[in-house]
Image (spheres, grey):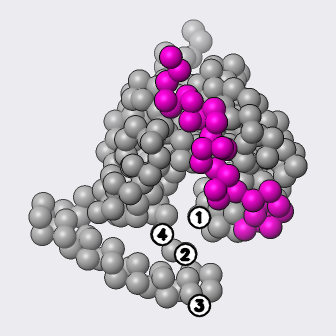
Amino acid sequence: MERLQNQVARLYYDTTAKRSHSACLAHYEDWSKAFIRQFKPWLPENKEAVCLDLACGCGEFLHLLESAGYANTAGVDLCGEELKQARPYVKGSLVHANVLEHLKTVKTGSTDFISALNFLEHLSKDELLATLNECRRALRPGGALVAMVPNAISPFASVTRYWDVTHEWAFTPNNFYQLAALTGFDSTIDFRECGPIPHGLLSVGRYLLWRTIRCAIALWFLIEVGTVRSSVFTMDMMVRLRTPLSPPLSECKP
């Protein structure tokens, strides 16, 4: 019998995505504006960078990359209907395949930037380890994997952890330090919150309120355990893993 995760992923547009997706340019432009505010500091400097979006869905993040001038983009997803929805708004290659199986076909050191937004939490721990290993292999030295995942440190972590029936778990920053050590990513890892970013009057108000709330969360941790644990308290968090500039000794030719 097909696993629940595979059934939902294969039919993700019908089971999930179509409730928030709109097949029009305005939808993609709105998502691009939201994404660029969050991800701009972490996008590659080189517009010729080879970019691969894992579980790309309806292509909103790929549309952002292409709108920002990136010329070499590709996405992979198990849901054919989502890729069909993406095609009118995405120029790059769209591959209908299991993400891990597709990663195994990617040439070693051929990719500069891999994005995995709201994807890693759908994997079992063994699948996660295998996926990160393949990402590190596919990335060039100095390349980056940027992910967005549920943040287990948030007081409302259960909202994102259980939002989707196929979510396997939520993450803490320490999980990524462990995984980086196992998979050969650099030990310096960047984390960011997915909170309000000021870009108008309403967002400024939300930002100021959020800063007050996060101070209260930090104080809670400080009182309970004597440390703030993390500087990331939003329900989702962003993480950037990078490959070392020099390959591991085991990969160097004699």
- Res. 231 image quadrant: bottom left
Element type at marker 3? helix
What residue is shown with label 1? 38
Occupied quadrant, residue 108:
top right
Amino acid tagged 4: Gly
On residue 201, the disc is 3
Mark 3 / mark 1, whichever is N-terminal: 1
Residue 188 percent coordinates (x, y): 43, 46
Query: Measured along the vertical axis of the image, is residue 182 above or below residue 156?
Result: above
Q: Quadrant of the C terminus?
A: top right
At label 3, the amino acid type is Leu
Q: Are marks 4 and 2 in contact (CB under 8 Å)?
A: yes
Residue in the foreground of this view, choosing between 97 and 190 = 97
The label on residue 195 is 4
User: What amino acid type should be assigned to the residue bearing mark 2?
Assistant: Ile
Whether label 1 touches label 2, CB < 8 Å: yes
Say the numbered circle drawn on residue 197. Answer: 2
